[in-house]
Image (cartoon, grey):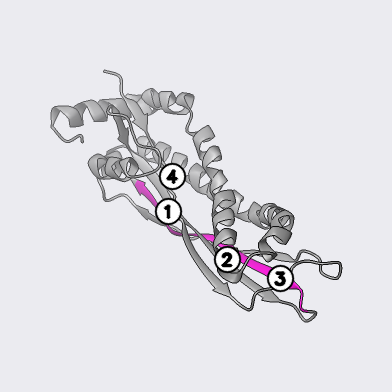
Amino acid sequence: MSWRLRLAVSAFLFCSAAISHAAPAGVDGGCQPSVTVRTAPLTYTEDDSGDVRAVTALNRKSSLPLTQRSFGLGSTYAESRVTSYWKKDAKGCPVLDLEVGYQKTAVHIASELKDDACAYEHVHAHEMHHLAIYRQWLEESPVRLGAFFKEKFSSLTAMDSLSRNQETIRLALQEFGKVRAQHDEFDSDAEYQGNQAVCGRFIPKMLDRLEKEGKLP
């Protein structure tokens, strides 16, 4: 029997916080766009206590639902967080300070994989690649988001305080969330098809056994 194996689906739940000072004046001839982007450290937890049913449930709740014949063997989950802080500098010019990062980042590995060290390491390595994508994206964010918001600076400073903060958060999360494409590129059909043969075909054999035992979702 052939299974479509879904090792990882990264999920996004965007959280935001905004702190507003007095509304900045619009950018004029004496003020240049000023944007600082800081990154929060990326930390994560690992959990291999949940079985295939539990990990599949995590993936089905994510932004990439599994098909009926797909099962989650691993899952990398992260919540994006953006903090927006508008203020004025000593000259009265508007300044934007952003902090971006991930929170509640967790890697889950199905507990049944602990029966085979090779299969466990195979799935774990896949999840670590997803984690590396998050980390690299985060490291590149100061340059990427800094350039993006300098282009948007004039339109944002023209808004009232509430609208400006809301739009800043929306745009930052939208840009920060574009990492999704890199996860999708890695989770290719070729990547998943290769799981059929690794480690003496332990993974498809395991799923066949779990189906016979009535332990699949």
Name the residue at 27% across, 43% down. 57
**How much space separates mark 2 and mark 1, taking CA atoms?**
19 Å
Name the residue at 26% across, 48% down. 50
Q: Dot 4 lies on which element? A: loop
Q: Dot 2 lies on which element? A: helix
**How much space separates mark 1 and mark 4, taking CA atoms?**
10 Å
Q: Nearer the viewer, mark 1 or mark 3?
A: 3
Q: Which residue is mark 1?
A: 13
Quadrant of the snapshot with the C terminus: top left
Quadrant of the snapshot with the N terminus: top left
Q: Dot 3 lies on which element? A: strand
Evaluate whether residue 118 shows in this view: yes
- The amino acid beneath tag 4 is Ser
Q: Position of residue 30 (x, y in %)?
A: 86, 70
Q: Nearer the viewer, mark 4 or mark 3?
A: 3
Of mark 4 and mark 3, the one earlier in the sequence is: 4
- The amino acid beneath tag 3 is Val
Q: Which residue is mark 3?
A: 95
Q: Nearer the viewer, mark 2 or mark 1?
A: 2
Q: Dot 1 lies on which element? A: loop
Instruction: Examine the rendered structure and indicate whether residue 148 appears above or below residue 182.
Output: below
- The amino acid beneath tag 1 is Leu
Of mark 2 and mark 1, the one earlier in the sequence is: 1
